[in-house]
Image (cartoon, rainbow, N blue to C red):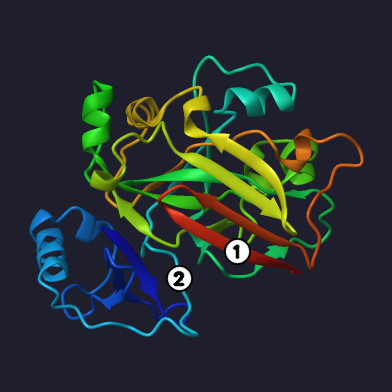
Amino acid sequence: MKLLRVGTAGAERPALLDTEGTLRDLSGVVADIDGALLADGAALGRVRSAAEAGELPALDPAGLRVGPPLARIGKVVCIGLNYHDHARETGAEAPAEPVIFFKAADTVVGPNDTVLVPRGSVKTDWEVELAVVIGRTARYLESEEEALAHVAGYAVAHDVSEREFQIERGGTWDKGKNCETFNPLGPWLVTADEVPDPQALSLKLWVNGELKQDGTTAEQIFPVAEVVRYVSQFMTLYPGDVINTGTPAGVALGQPEPKPFLRAGDVVELEIAGLGRQRQELKNA
């Protein structure tokens, strides 16, 4: 299933994109798309049955904002330097273990919402990423098979980053990762049954129409299953938590000088095969 949330910010309602590409209203079946729904097999079954029976009313998508596909996100765990080609382009050694940092849940916005360039920023960068959405509480998982069984679905994430704040201002990476609007998510939460192999997905990103990133999750140093298993050794993952799994080569940081960092007025578009497409215009904060 392709689950999404539509409407004005803070007042989104649950919806579903059916197999014919028609937007369907889910508000008569479930209250919202969140961790509680993802952990409730019976409720998900009702959604699936209603969709298959053709019982869901159609929605007119014209002028309808698409919000983040998941409400009440608990935490956003991020994996840094997780693509071989991205590590090479930035001159970094491939890590021996996954690099973990966090984004606050309030950085998450809709897939087509405005992204704000922070005040004083000169190095705002782009990163297309595969987001993993957790569907079952995960603690000390023992195998990659067990890890995948705890995944509810997948989504497109844009891990917007300010490189000066992240790298040159001391301390942790978090200063360059948690500026407002720095995690567009969606358009859809695609349930795991529609993604048989998360290591076979193409990722692309364009800036002002120019292709900048053209990668595949096959390049991940630590595959999705290992990332989920590994993270569960250090923290409990709950339904509705999100893991951003890293970005392939092609970011501004890896380009020759002068590096083409983002400015107000730029337009970024990104997509992952089968998971949908995003588009953001940048404005000054």
The image position of residue 260, as x and y in percent, is: 83, 47
Using a 10 Å C-alpha cutoff, classify the residue at mark 2 as few (fewer than 14 neighbours), some (14 to 19) or many (20 or more).
many
Q: Report the residue that reaches farthest toward the front.
A: 20
The image position of residue 96, as x and y in percent, is: 53, 14
Q: Quadrant of the C terminus?
A: bottom right
Which residue: 27% across, 71% down? 32
Which residue: 27% across, 57% down? 35
Q: CA distance from mark 1 to mark 2?
A: 12 Å
Q: Nearer the viewer, residue 171 or 247?
A: 247
Q: Nearer the viewer, residue 45 or 8?
A: 45
User: Contact (CB < 8 A) between labels 1 and 2?
Assistant: no
Residue under pointer 2 = 67
Q: Is residue 88 above or below residue 42?
A: above
- Residue 194 numbered mark, or none: none
Q: Is residue 168 left or right of residue 29?
A: right
Q: Is residue 246 left or right of residue 190?
A: right
Q: Is residue 225 left or right of residue 141?
A: right
Residue under pointer 1 = 279
Q: Is residue 57 above or below residue 192?
A: below
Using a 10 Å C-alpha cutoff, classify the residue at mark 1 as few (fewer than 14 neighbours), some (14 to 19) or many (20 or more).
many
